[in-house]
Image (tube, rainbow, N blue to C red):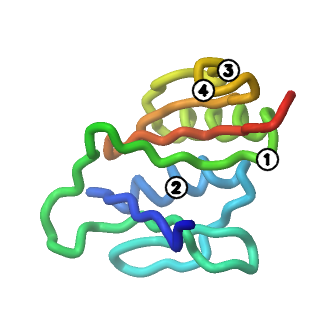
Amino acid sequence: MFSHVTIGSNDLGVAKPFYDALLAPLGLVRRMDFPNGVGYGQAGGRPQLWVVSPIDRKSATAGNGITIGLDAADRPAVDAAHKAAMAAGARDEGAPGIRAHYHPNYYGAYLRDPDGNKICIVCHKPG
């Protein structure tokens, strides 16, 4: 359904190592690097998640009600990505666990990146 998702950052020097750490357990790697941004995707694939400085040169801001959901292959990958993000400077918004109010197999974790963007890491498969 989506071609790509773009996340704004005010400090790419902080954002790049943060997203490198967060995305590695999910099998996503840095695919492209530009002066104003970086693109992540699967090895051999095209970038589908971009972290960029806003083109209009205004400050990047986190949107209220916006969450970027990242799919994990399994529950250990959710745990590993959350742990890596926390070590890289994330703010916890909900530790890994079942969110049965979504569905019985929804295993997710929530965090904020260094710019305040809300990120969900989720596995929809049974444990």
Residue at the location (79% across, 47% down)?
73
Q: Which residue is mark 4?
A: 102
Question: Image point 28% across, 46% down: which residue?
Answer: 62
Question: Residue at 63% of width from left, 30% of height from top?
Answer: 108
For residue 24, the mark is none
Residue 121 vs 35, above or below: the answer is above
The residue labelled by disc 2 is 17
Sequence-wise, which precedes: disc 4 or disc 2?
Answer: 2
Residue marked by disc 1: 73
Secondary structure under badge 1? loop
Disc 3 element: strand
Q: Amino acid at mark 4?
A: Tyr
* Distance Cα–Cα, label 2 vs label 3: 25 Å
Query: On the rendered structure, is 108 left or right of 8?
Result: right
Q: Residues within 10 Å of mark 1 (few under 14, many from 20)?
A: some
Instruction: For marks 4 and 3, give the one nearer the viewer.
Output: 4
Q: Is residue 43 above or below residue 28?
A: below
Residue type highlighted by circle 1: Ala
Q: CA distance from mark 2 to mark 1?
A: 22 Å
Left or right: residue 36 compared with residue 5: left
Question: In the rendered image, which quarter is residue 79 located in?
Answer: top right
The kind of residue on which mark 2 rests is Pro
Q: Nearer the viewer, residue 10 or 106?
A: 106
Measured as percent of width and height from the top left, residue 24 is found at 69, 54
In this view, the residue farthest toward the right is: 127
Q: Earlier in the sequence, mark 1 or mark 4?
A: 1
Q: Estimate the spatial distance between the alpha carbons at disc 4 and disc 3, rounded to whole Å.
A: 12 Å
Q: Secondary structure at mark 4?
A: loop
Q: Position of residue 67 (x, y in %)?
A: 43, 43
The front one of 30 and 124 is 124
Instruction: Classify 92 as above or below 36.
Output: above
From the image, which quarter does the C terminus lie in? top right
